[in-house]
Amino acid sequence: MEIAFLTLLVLSLLLFPSGICKSLAAGPPVVNIGSILQFNSTTGGVAEVAIRAALEDINSDPTVLNGTTLKVKIKDTNCFDGFLGMVQGLQFMETDVIAIVGPQCSTISHIISYAANELRVPLMSFASDATLSTIQFPFFVRTGSSDLYQMAAVAALVDYNHWKIVTAIYIDNDYGRNGIIALDDALTAKRCKISYKVSFPSNAKRSELINLLVGVSYMESRVIILHTGAEHGLKFFSMANQLNMMGNGYVWIATDWLSAYLDANSSVPADIISGMQGVLTLRPHIPNSKMKSNLISKWSRQSHKYNHSDLRVNTYGFYVYDSVWALARALDAFFGDGGRISFSNDSKLHHEAGETLHLEAMSIFDMGNKLLENIRKVNFTGASGKVQFDASGDLIHPAYDIINLIGNGMRTVGFWSNYSGLLSTISPEALYSKPPNTSLANQNLYDVIWPGETAQRPRGWVFPSNAKELKIGVPNRFSFKEFVTEDNATGSINGYCIDVFTQALSLLPYPVSYKLIPFGSGTENPSYDKLIQMVESNEFDAAIGDIAITMSRTVAIDFTQPFIETGLVILAPVKKHIKTSWAFLQPFTLEMWCVTGLFFLIVGVVVWVLEHRINEDFRGPPSQQIITIFWFSFSTLFFSHREDIRSTLGRGVLIIWLFVVLIIVSSYTASLTSILTVQQLDTSIKGIDDLKSSDDPVGFQVGSFAQDYMVNELNISRSRLRALGSPQEYADALQLGPKKGGVMAIVDERPYVELFLSTYCKIAVAGSDFTSRGWGFAFPRDSPLQVDLSTAILSLSENGELQRIRDKWVKTGDCTTDNSEFVDSDQLRLESFFGLFLICGVACVLALLIYFGIMLRKYLKHHPRRSLRRFISFVHSKEPPKNMERRSMSLLRSSTPTTPMSSLTALDIERPARPVRNDSAIDMES
């Protein structure tokens, strides 16, 4: 029997070495873990039930821990009494536990984390404080959601609804303060901000909380973020309902404390639910799974068993349940790797022994680092979903449900996932199989029912009812007072810009109290850049007037939608275009005249060459032929040539040339007609290039941004610039000119120029606008009034009110129609007709090549003795008629055989035979 047993043992060692080693490496019979909770809180009660349920499942599972029983020691602490809670937590650290589940409170977690680092005891905490990092606290293991991601979800919700400012109400402890810091950072990344932060102590009285809410109601923001616990949060909603702060216009966003409370409590008083209608809250996303369903199905039995029958499982219950399972799996790997549980005393703690806190009783977990390493390596699917830690120590793929409280329940309107960073109606786990899509255009939520039972998205802010009057700076102009000015007699401020502002204010759905304060003496135009600086420094709450929107100004403040389009233009003195007897030459440039005349001669010569042999109109003495060439070519200008064109090539060239002549004559006629009838205006400046290349003075309006633009953008020397303060100064400076102390041109904005030209008719705009800008009203950064006024200005533009206001103030005179725009008097240039001349030239060359090719072929056919002189003589000679050519050929055939055909020249053939004069013939003639 003993031999058989030994044999079996040897075979087991050989065949199953790993199983035997695992058995030999099994842990102790009992392992103690700790838990620090607040029993009288919803989260603490749920966490206790979850811990007990997890231990039952683990200890009954033979595949985990290999027979080692896991036991828990739970310590009740007070989260709201920070000092007492810390003392209780440190007292608990005197017990020898290998890990702690909790604490649930951020304040206690900070203190216990220091002790955990010293004692090497991992903390499996579900505290959400984002400042609890693994860098500072290596033994802190967050097994729940972090406020870092929750506040990113809140910021995405704020940005999705186009709100820019929010009010934050939070409890004044580590949980509240650090959560709002995370929210502030997340909102800043979305170009939003917290305009008003309100904190309260944990022991605040009801009267103090009411005063706090009254102060919030006076603020302009109507988007309120509530980051507290359930005890205080429910009080806030009850009091806000009594103060009518749960109606139309308000937005309430509660962090995950509200969803945790509502999920865990089976019976919530009806008055509490009715006071939270339309509230939005967040809930850490827990995907559906079999383990989740199993825990929910047995939760009722477990909660009755451990005296929490009134509590249901919530997200924290899932997280705590998986925390215990993660610890069990890590312990299993720990024992499998040869880990042992042993404790040793710390000499530093022994020397610091006290009477109440027995620090000398605290022991260091010798292999705590190894257990921590195994905890961070766990990877399994639990009741809360995938349990796996990233490099920063947080659970992978954090996500949240967006919950809307409607009626007696909660409705999920969407999700937020850190995987994409966007809001979506698609569940997060469905996105993980696809590449992350971070386009804001893909954001979407289901319709939300807001406070006041309305589906219309609230504006998010109102003008505060107790706000002081807005101090609005208005430039007190000296010139162009039609736009904005102060009436010295009545003290009122009016003008085009003022009418636009008041009409836009009338479209706002709330009253705005304001006071217009003149900026400037009225004896000269003020500095608009200084006015913008006063808005930036909050000396003025806004600035309205003819304020140009420039890049440098938009860096400091925000502008409304432009209510008038404008740009810089050049003003220059003009003169009548017709002041010479040679005006008929002006339609064409010199090059155009020369090339046109040259082509008249070229076409005349080409036609003469093509017609010379066969057309009597192109033959005769040399002087007569030259006259014919000139006469024919220039007579085509009037389509009155009398010469008949017989050759096909000549007719082709003539058709093309007549088409060219038609275009040239038509263009010349149109240009000359415009010059003689419209009487164009002429200036010495054609555009911005002439302005930059010259050294003459240039004028600008006092206070205008044109000065800096010319210096910085056009690189015009500041010494060339002359400040001008009134329309009369404009006219005088331009009339004098640069030689007599004036300016060559003035650079100003289009609206001023249009008003100026309605009176001064001897000045015009040279070129076109060389900037594209507009006038807008200036407000401090992120002012909600700026957004609403922009919408109002667009409405004024669409209904035609802006144009009506402009017609009222910016009137144009009679001369504006004729002279306000500079008509470009550039002559017709050769470049415009280059294509026509090219076609005509190519036609002439082709015709000549074809003609000389035909002539060469004829010459080679009939003249064996070849020379250039004979060929030129052949081309120059007149082509005989067809019957004459046939008779010549007959005579050649009947000639004596001693005269070979090849010895006759073309001239012999063409020349008629001269009769032989004999005596009998002479007698007959006589």
Image: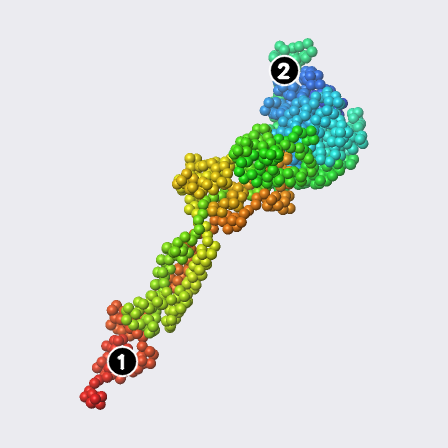
Question: Under tag 1, what secondary structure?
Answer: loop
Foreground pick, 356 / 213: 213
> Around disc 2, counting alpha carbons within 10 Å, would you say few (fewer than 14), some (14 to 19), or many (20 or more)?
few
Q: Is residue 634 left or right of residue 35?
A: left
CA separation, marks 2 and 1?
Answer: 145 Å
> The residue under label 2 is which amino acid type?
Ser
Q: Which mark is residue 912?
A: 1
Residue 796 screen position, x and y as percent: 63, 43
Q: What is the quadrant of residue 486 in the picture?
A: top right
Most extreme residue toward the left is 919
Query: For the point 53% across and 46% down, which residue is it?
Result: 758
Mark 2 or mark 1: which comes first in sequence? 2
Q: Which mark is residue 387?
A: none
Query: For the point 68% across and 31% down, which residue is it?
Result: 464
Query: For the point 26% across and 84% down, which residue is it?
Result: 894
Tell which tag, 2 or 1, sits nearer the viewer.
Answer: 1
**Which quarter of the image is occupied by the N terminus?**
top right
> The residue under label 1 is which amino acid type?
Pro
Q: What is the quadrant of residue 124 in the picture?
A: top right
Residue 113 screen position, x and y as percent: 64, 21
Most extreme residue toward the front is 489
Residue 821 screen position, x and y as percent: 50, 48
Query: For the point 39% across and 59% down, which residue is it?
Result: 838
From the image, tell me which residue sits under label 2: 344
Up-down relation of residue 360 to residue 807 (above or below): above
Q: What is the quadrant of residue 217 in the picture?
A: top right
